[in-house]
Image: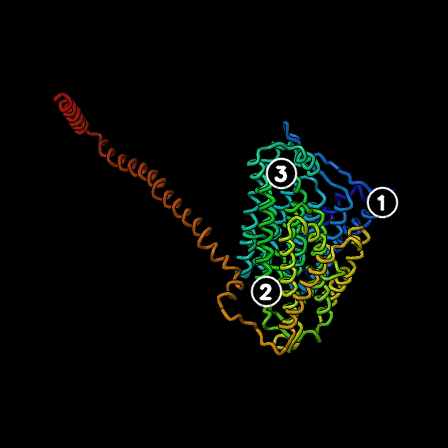
């Protein structure tokens, strides 16, 4: 059947994006400039649409079918055999649909957002790199190839954040984002290399089978698991490697749509794949839960104190990735995947609805906004749909994921259920705060002339809003919703209460015109503590940066005065000796005789001193 051909050639999906990126290169500056850069974007749009259709047809053909694996030989050296393993299942193909679909909407969105930008070829090629990397990651069934792809995505993040490289802050943000993620990648590489001699494979399926009967020392299991966690920890912007996501906000909004919804989630995807291995160490599970709790709660508090639209949303991203860490740490990888799906749709919609506002008003400062509801109703409605889809507000998607997570923890670790309530309530407060500051109140100088954006901004936003509203129907069709008769009603009620309280208190403060804004706490120090990210940047400067700088200075001093000093001393002695000996070569025999007599005299004097 023709549909089976689409399943067997599922590996072509990443290739479509790569083909689009290559075909867009001739429109780079200096090669083709008569037609302008737009054809580069249209080519990538067509290739992404083809990839989306391929994924959609393959999903219908693979529905209710058992998972299969396609192995492509790549390298065989001695006893090392590395194949490109492709997992063909409903889950992986569905993930490619989400990736290609959101990238397609982002590229349409970029038509309007990047309208006057001449970097189309470079920008769309990098979006294609993101798409190809993420599709390859969800399809591959190998930790080795996952690491390679994560490195490619790190490079793509650096290049996309630094797209407007003429601005100093952009260059700094791209550099910091790249270096921060590299810290986690370095530890992940150690774990990848150490895992092969222990398990004898990098294949995820075989690793899960090995973990069931693995008998390794507890210390080895702990160290191995911690190194494997470090990579996803950096990718998901978890503490202490969370600052890169804030720096990455210097990139264009269309790339932010992908980065904040999907790119940060690829680390969590790898984490769910490695869960059987990580379960070998109770310490690793405790670390995942601890990191997730700390990041989720603290990032939610920090988001409330931000006055930059993109910064506030970026900290909400870290908070939700923290919840995913909690889910994986407690053995709920299926729940984590559902949460990743519902979160990705809602967060992408929130960024789309605010991106058009930023483009038109040329500001990201929330204090300069207000009164946009009457001028941009489609953006406002889309924002509310995204907000409702992000928090636990039934019947939308994230409610069911958070409910399933809380229900599983209710009997074993009830304190984590309290964390879910707090994070959900704080996120609801933060989201409605941004809505009130942007769309409600009186208009200000920056918002007096701010009509709804071009069709390319409105169309993908409207499509995604409709899709977000239909997420519960998809979950029901996939039989992922709980039976209404078995729902834990106290947990569901508390989750709903936390959302209502968050929305209610936030609305009371920020939608109410009588409440003076900006809000100031009685003690400015507390407000600054949250606004400046717990002074994490300063903490880095007085600890890690200081230690690295001190070590660098010590090494520089040793290299300059000891290593170079010894080399320079030998060179100086050689030059001095040569300069001194050149006077002994005069060509006069009496001078040579004098030299011999002086030498014999000195030798006899030394012997005489030795005898007496």
Residue positioned 36% across, 45% down in the render: 557
Residue positioned 59% across, 73% down in the render: 368
Do we see residue 32 in this rendering? Answer: no
Furthest-top residue in this view: 611
Q: Is residue 54 left or right of residue 227?
A: right
Determine whether 31 is above or below 368 in the image: above
x, y percent for residue 405? 69, 52
Count neighbours of disc 1 (C-alpha within 10 A) and say few if under 14, some if 14 to 19, many if 20 or more: some
Q: Nearer the viewer, mark 1 or mark 3?
A: 3
State the separation of the CA atoms marked 2 and 3: 37 Å
State the separation of the CA atoms marked 1 and 3: 40 Å
Out of 597 and 282, give the one closest to the viewer. 282
The residue identified by callout 2 is 304
Q: Is residue 158 left or right of residue 612?
A: right
Determine whether 552 is above or below 569 in the image: below
Task: Point out which mark residue 607 bears.
Answer: none
The residue identified by callout 1 is 3
Q: Residue 278 appears in which quarter of the rendering?
A: top right
The residue identified by callout 3 is 280
Out of 177 and 278, give the one closest to the viewer. 278
Q: Nearer the viewer, mark 2 or mark 3?
A: 3
Mark 2 lies on a secondary structure that is helix
Count neighbours of disc 3 (C-alpha within 10 A) and say few if under 14, some if 14 to 19, many if 20 or more: many
Mark 1 lies on a secondary structure that is helix
State the separation of the CA atoms marked 1 and 2: 49 Å
x, y percent for residue 41? 71, 57
Which quarter of the rendered picture does the N terminus lie within? top right
Mark 2 or mark 3: which comes first in sequence? 3
Residue positioned 16% across, 25% down in the render: 606
Mark 1 or mark 2: which comes first in sequence? 1
């Amino acid at each position: 059947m023709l549909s089976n051909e689409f399943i067997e050639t599922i590996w072509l999906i990443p290739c479509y994006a790569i083909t689009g990126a290559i075909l867009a290169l001739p429109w780079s500056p200096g090669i083709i400039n008569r037609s302008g850069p737009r054809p580069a974007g249209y080519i990538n749009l067509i290739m992404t649409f083809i990839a989306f259709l391929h994924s959609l047809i393959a999903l219908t053909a693979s529905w209710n079918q058992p998972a299969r694996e396609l192995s492509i030989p790549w390298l065989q050296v001695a006893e090392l055999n590395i194949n490109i393993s492709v997992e063909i299942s409903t889950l992986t193909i569905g993930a490619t649909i989400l990736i290609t679909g959101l990238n397609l909407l982002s590229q349409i969105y970029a038509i309007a957002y990047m309208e006057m930008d001449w970097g189309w070829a470079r920008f769309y090629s990098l979006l294609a790199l993101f798409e190809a990397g993420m599709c390859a990651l969800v399809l591959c069934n190998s930790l080795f190839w996952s690491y390679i792809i994560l490195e490619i995505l790190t490079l793509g993040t650096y290049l996309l954040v630094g797209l407007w490289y003429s601005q100093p802050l952009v260059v700094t943000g791209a550099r910091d984002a790249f270096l921060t993620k590299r810290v986690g990648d370095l530890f992940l590489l150690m774990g990848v290399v150490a895992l092969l001699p222990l398990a004898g494979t990098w294949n995820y399926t075989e690793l899960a089978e090995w973990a069931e009967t693995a008998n390794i020392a507890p210390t080895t299991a702990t160290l191995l698991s911690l190194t494997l966690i470090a990579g996803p920890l950096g990718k998901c912007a978890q503490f202490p490697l969370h600052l890169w996501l804030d720096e990455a906000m210097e990139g264009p909004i269309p790339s932010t749509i992908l980065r904040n919804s999907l790119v940060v989630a690829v680390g969590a995807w790898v984490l769910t794949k490695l869960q059987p291995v990580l379960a070998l160490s109770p310490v690793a599970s405790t670390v995942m839960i601890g990191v997730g709790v700390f990041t989720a709660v603290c990032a939610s508090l920090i988001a409330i104190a931000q006055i930059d639209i993109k910064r506030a949303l970026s900290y909400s991203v870290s908070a939700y990735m923290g919840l995913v860490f909690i889910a994986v740490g407690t053995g709920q990888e299926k729940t984590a995947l559902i949460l990743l799906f519902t979160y990705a749709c809602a967060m992408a919609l929130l960024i789309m609805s605010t991106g058009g506002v930023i483009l038109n008003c040329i500001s990201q400062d929330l204090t300069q906004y207000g009164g946009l509801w009457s001028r941009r109703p489609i953006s406002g409605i889309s924002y509310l749909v995204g907000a409702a889809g992000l928090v636990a507000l039934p019947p939308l998607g994230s409610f069911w994921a958070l409910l399933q997570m809380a229900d599983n923890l209710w009997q074993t670790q009830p304190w984590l259920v309290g964390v879910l309530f707090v994070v959900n309530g704080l996120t609801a407060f933060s989201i409605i705060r941004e809505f009130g500051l942007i769309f409600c109140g009186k208009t200000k100088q920056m918002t007096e002339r701010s009509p709804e954006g071009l069709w390319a901004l409105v169309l993908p936003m409207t499509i995604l809003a409709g899709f977000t509203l239909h997420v519960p129907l998809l979950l029901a069709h996939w039989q992922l919703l709980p039976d209404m008769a078995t729902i834990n009603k106290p947990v569901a009620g508390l989750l709903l209460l936390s959302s209502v309280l968050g929305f209610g208190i936030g609305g009371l403060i920020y939608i109410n015109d009588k409440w003076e804004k900006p809000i100031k706490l009685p003690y400015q120090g507390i407000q600054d503590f949250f606004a400046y990210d717990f002074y994490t940047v300063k903490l880095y400067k007085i600890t890690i940066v200081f230690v690295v700088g001190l070590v660098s200075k010590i090494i520089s001093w040793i290299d300059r005065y000891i290593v170079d000093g010894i080399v320079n001393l030998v060179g100086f002695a050689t030059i001095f000796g040569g300069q001194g000996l050149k006077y002994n070569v005069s060509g006069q025999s009496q001078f040579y005789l004098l030299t011999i007599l002086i030498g014999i005299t000195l030798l006899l004097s030394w012997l005489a001193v030795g005898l007496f």
